[in-house]
């Protein structure tokens, strides 16, 4: 217990309070922090177009990427759940990208795959679609990043699969008797029975998606380009704080992120009463 | 749903649908074939980037951009030879050794501190345990970036930049809630009778922890160790902030040397190093995939 207490107080709670204080200051690591009130926050929302752009692309990334990723995870999990024999191999193959996905190597491969003359580009040109490289293309680099996120659907898939295995088979049989087709069964049995797992995955994946960093850093060589289209929130925060030495501003950005994540978690928890069912347990 | 109802349902179905069994089997087979086909195609798409990486390491740099396919036109092992020579006067094994050192220390730290903390959460009753447990779960959702700035300032004031201390110290202090949580869940499944019996025999918490709990939570420890290793091996932001001298770089940062300096001219070397950096994780994955998959599944379900 003691090590955790030290770690929690010294490396989590203490720094949190300090970073809240920093967010109201101007601090460049060398001279003392200067108290500036809400200036950082005001500047962020009124005078910093780069900030607004990074918010925008991060939101698109989260709002498009996360549902697609979860849908893919659920779809594949249901496929794997259909039959037991042989699904172990597929399950592992699909999980592999999730595990290695955070590595720099993957970001490098991804960039090569989508570059001009790379495998993706040339297979699309077979169908007569000539778009050249995705990385330098302002409108395609964000979809490319979303594809990278969706590619790593393995972790939520494994959780979905464990959830699917716990749904009693009788419920499906009963639904068949009532004349329910596959769509109806999915809507009335699978979704409600799986809702707590969906909730868990949604919460975790949303929060993770807000924090995308290393792939954006590698793919844009730390610049967030082209034209700021990979300047995701945390990359911009890193650039402000650690490259430009605007620690106060970066701390304020971190707090905005924390508040947004807290609000999302709160809203999800509050609305979850309405759509999350805990099987067989009355609360 | 009672069993009686189920039986009746089956009976009913049998009466309404006295379908010949042969037909049913046939449809099952067709479905299975479609099932296999869909999954094989999906697997091929999912794994293609990795397979492409492996084959590309044998392409001469000039071939990139001209041959997007899998098989190199002029296979060569020059990429590997060049890469093994190192970069900027630093041999490749040095980066591997750095990464390995950090990862091994991190694994030791995570296991020691998380197991102790988890034992305390699961078994010791003390004031405020509920609040602390909630706080610990809360840190699971806390964006890392809120604390990275003050941590950086702190380590800078302590003159610990360009050492491995900022990377390893947090692991010894159980800051990664994922592992504490995983082990807590595991300990809660161990019947309390065992440690109560030990307590009657006069064993204290330390004794109970080491001689009863620790051997029983081995599966959770193995899962944690594997994850801790892989995550530390992959970590990019930490070393990017704290490690400045190239001879201390772990692999992910060293990869940037290849990538930045040579991305246009020497694609071959870049992909070769990328693959070598990925290799330990891939081996880990193949050997331990069962533990990893189950670790994720339990973490999710009991959440």
Image: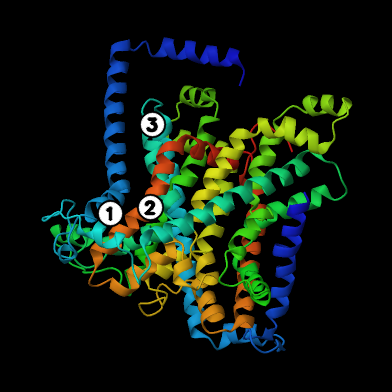
Residue farthest toward the left in the current orientation of the protein:
B73
Give above or below for A157 relative to B63.
above
Would you say the residues marked 1 and 2 are in contact, meaning their CB atoms lie under 8 Å apart? yes
Q: Quadrant of residue A20?
A: bottom right
Q: Residue at x 46, y 49 (%)?
A: A70
Residue pointed to by mark 2? B278
Q: Secondary structure at mark 2?
A: helix
Residue pointed to by mark 1? B53
**Pointer 3 indicates a residue of which chain?**
A
Q: Nearer the viewer, mark 3 or mark 2?
A: 2
Q: Is residue B247 visible?
A: yes
Residue B95 drawn at (x, y percent): 42, 61
Q: Secondary structure at mark 3?
A: helix
Real-space CA distance between mark 1 and mark 2, rounded to the nearest whole angstrom: 10 Å
Q: Are marks 3 and 2 on the same chain?
A: no
Give above or below for A242 relative to B4.
below
Q: Is residue A136 visible?
A: no
User: In screen coordinates, is B116 left or right of B259?
Assistant: right
Q: Are marks 1 and 2 on the same chain?
A: yes
Real-space CA distance between mark 3 and mark 2, rounded to the nearest whole angstrom: 25 Å
Residue A243 drawn at (x, y percent): 51, 81
| Classed neighbour count for the residue bearing mark 3: other residues with Cα under 10 Å, few (<14), some (14–19), many (≥20) | some
Would you say the residues marked 3 and 2 are in contact, meaning their CB atoms lie under 8 Å apart? no
């Amino acid at each position: 217990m003691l090590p955790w207490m030290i770690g929690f107080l010294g490396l989590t709670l203490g720094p949190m309070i300090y970073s809240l204080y920093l967010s109201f200051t101007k601090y460049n690591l060398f001279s003392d922090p200067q108290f500036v009130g809400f200036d950082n926050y005001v500047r962020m929302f009124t005078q910093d177009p780069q900030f607004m752009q990074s918010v925008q692309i991060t939101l698109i990334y989260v709002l498009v990427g996360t549902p697609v990723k979860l849908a893919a995870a659920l779809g594949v999990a249901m496929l794997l759940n259909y039959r037991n024999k042989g699904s172990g191999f597929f399950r592992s193959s699909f999980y592999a990208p999730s595990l290695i996905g955070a590595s720099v190597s993957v970001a490098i491969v991804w960039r090569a795959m989508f570059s001009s003359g790379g495998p993706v580009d040339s297979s699309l040109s077979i169908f007569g679609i000539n778009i050249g490289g995705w990385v330098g293309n302002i409108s395609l680099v964000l979809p490319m990043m979303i594809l990278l996120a969706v590619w790593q659907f393995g972790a939520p898939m494994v959780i979905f699969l464990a959830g699917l295995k716990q749904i009693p088979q009788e419920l499906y049989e009963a639904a068949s008797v009532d004349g329910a087709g596959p769509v109806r069964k999915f809507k009335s049995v699978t979704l409600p029975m799986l809702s707590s797992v969906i909730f868990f995955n949604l919460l975790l994946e949303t929060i993770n998606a807000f924090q995308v960093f290393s792939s954006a850093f590698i793919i844009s060589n730390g610049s967030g380009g082209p034209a700021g289209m990979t300047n995701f929130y945390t990359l911009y925060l890193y650039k402000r704080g650690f490259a430009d030495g605007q620690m106060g501003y970066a701390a304020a950005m971190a707090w905005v992120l924390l508040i947004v994540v807290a609000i999302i978690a709160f809203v999800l928890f509050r609305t979850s009463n309405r759509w999350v069912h805990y099987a067989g347990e009355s609360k | 749903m009672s069993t009686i109802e189920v039986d009746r349902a089956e009976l009913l179905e049998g009466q309404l649908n006295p379908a010949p069994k042969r037909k049913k089997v046939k449809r099952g087979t067709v479905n299975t074939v479609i099932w296999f086909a869909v999954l094989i195609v999906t697997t091929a798409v999912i794994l293609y980037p990795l397979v492409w990486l492996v084959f590309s390491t044998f392409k001469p740099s000039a071939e990139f951009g001209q041959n997007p396919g899998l098989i190199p036109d002029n296979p060569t092992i020059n990429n590997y030879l060049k890469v093994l020579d190192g970069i900027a006067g630093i041999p490749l094994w040095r980066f591997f050794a750095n990464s390995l050192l950090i990862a091994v220390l991190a694994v030791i730290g995570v296991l020691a501190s998380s197991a102790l903390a988890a034992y305390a959460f699961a078994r010791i009753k003390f004031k405020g345990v509920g609040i602390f447990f909630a706080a610990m779960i809360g840190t699971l959702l806390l964006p890392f970036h809120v604390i990275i700035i003050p941590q950086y300032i702190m380590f800078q004031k302590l003159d610990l930049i360009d050492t491995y201390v900022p990377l390893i110290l947090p692991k010894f202090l159980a800051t990664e809630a994922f592992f504490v949580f995983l082990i807590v869940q595991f300990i809660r499944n161990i019947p309390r009778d065992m440690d109560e019996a030990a307590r009657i025999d006069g064993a204290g918490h330390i004794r109970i922890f080491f001689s009863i709990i620790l051997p029983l939570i081995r599966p959770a420890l193995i899962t944690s160790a594997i994850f801790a290793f892989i995550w530390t091996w992959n970590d990019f932001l930490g070393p990017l902030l704290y490690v400045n001298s190239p001879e201390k770089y772990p692999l992910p940062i060293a990869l940037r040397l290849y990538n930045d300096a040579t991305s246009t001219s020497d694609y071959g070397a870049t992909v070769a190093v990328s693959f070598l950096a990925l290799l330990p994780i891939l081996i880990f994955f193949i050997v331990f995939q069962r533990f990893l998959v189950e670790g994720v599944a339990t973490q999710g379900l009991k959440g």
